[in-house]
Image (cartoon, grey):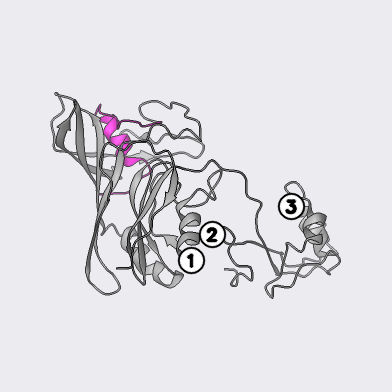
Amino acid sequence: MPPRSPLPPRFGLSAAWMRTPDRDPADPRPWPTMREWLHARLHEHIDVPDWLAQERFVYDSGAPVRADDVYAPHTFVWFHRELQDEAPVPGEMHVVHRDERLVVIDKPAFLSTIPRGKHVQQSVVVRMRAALDLPELSPLHRLDRVTSGLLIMATERRWRGAYQTMFQHGVVDKTYHALAPVCEDLTLPRIVKNHLTKRRGHLQAEVVADAPANAESLVELESERDGAGIYRLTPRTGRTHQLRVHMNGLGVPISGDPLYPIDRDVAIDDFSTPLQLLASGLTFVDPVDGTRRSFESVRTLPLLAATSTTTATAPQN
């Protein structure tokens, strides 16, 4: 683990770091200076001499890395990444609860949980760290980018372990609601069990026939509205795309799904058709103080396309 960053967050995003390897006398790639090591690592991505001149690389102490500094093994170097332009994701982020340990966000569709790939500034973590002035804010579980609803976050690193263990052990009761077609031949309620896997580089998760079940969901039809069904979904495991795959497998794919039953190749900045899947409820016994916690989404189905970007906050509870 690296030491604490000497650089403050920028736009809600923590500084990146690299560590020089230990010097090996037999290493055929000597780096006499820190500039040469940085060039070897980063020259394909940035103009290293220009960044050095601007003092954009710093050591643990906060002192800038100089071009002629002698190479030092096992040394951390910190810097802020260049951020690409991103289309602002529309919709409100409701803070439904905030206390010393937890923040509960009700996120809109299309907003990534964590900064990654093409979604950095447009992520819950980056936006809410800046909005709430909580530089260590981090999610305890994840929602698909296209899924709306409740996301629980720890305010500081020191609280993360106990709550993450709670999610890993499956002791959090999660409730989702989905809008999907009604099939008269489908008998509900029904428990769906199968083996799901998602291969790297493949957008869709797959069902593996004849393999031991690793995914389980309870599917119930709660009501009907304008020819569509409002389904109550209770996942008992947490596989990637689990509810979307299970609903599709029952012949009632969730409305607005860009991947199931087929990949519709929706543009990354097309926010016109929200997936009609809502993480609507979370209930658990708090591992720190033993109290029973229960949260509900402020959103209802159907989820409508948003046109503007705002961040809503709420008083501390």
Element type at mark 2: loop
Residue at image mark 2 = 12
Q: Nearer the viewer, residue 61 or 238?
A: 61
Crowd tier of the residue under label 1, counting other residues whose Cα lies within 10 Å: few below 14, some 14–19, many 20 or above:
few
Q: Residues under labels 1 and 3: Cα distance?
A: 31 Å
Q: Nearer the N terminus, badge 2 or badge 3?
A: 2
How far is mark 2 from mark 3, CA to CA?
A: 23 Å
Q: Looking at the image, can residue 27 be seen?
A: no
Q: Give coordinates of residue 22: x percent, y percent.
A: 72, 67
Q: Earlier in the sequence, mark 2 or mark 1?
A: 2
Q: Secondary structure at mark 3?
A: helix
Task: From the image, tell me which residue sits under label 1.
Answer: 133
Where is 244 relative to 234, above or below? above
- Assign the C terminus to one quadrant of the image: bottom left
Q: CA distance from mark 2 to mark 1?
A: 8 Å
Residue 70 percent across, percent down from the top left? 84, 69
Query: Can residue 100 be found in the magenta stretch?
Result: no
Q: Which residues are magenta?
A: 236-258
The answer to which image quadrant residue 204 occupies is: top left
Residue that numbered label 3 is attached to? 42
What's the residue at 40%, 31% (across, down)?
Answer: 258
> Looking at the picture, which amino acid does disc 2 mark?
Gly
| Left or right, 51 with reference to 221 | right
Say which amino acid is labelled 3: Leu
Query: Pointers 1 and 3 in contact (CB under 8 A)?
Result: no
Comparing 41 with 155, the one in front is 155
Q: Kindly identify the residue that appears in the image at 79 percent across and 54 percent down.
A: 48
* Residue occupying the point 78% across, 51% down: 47
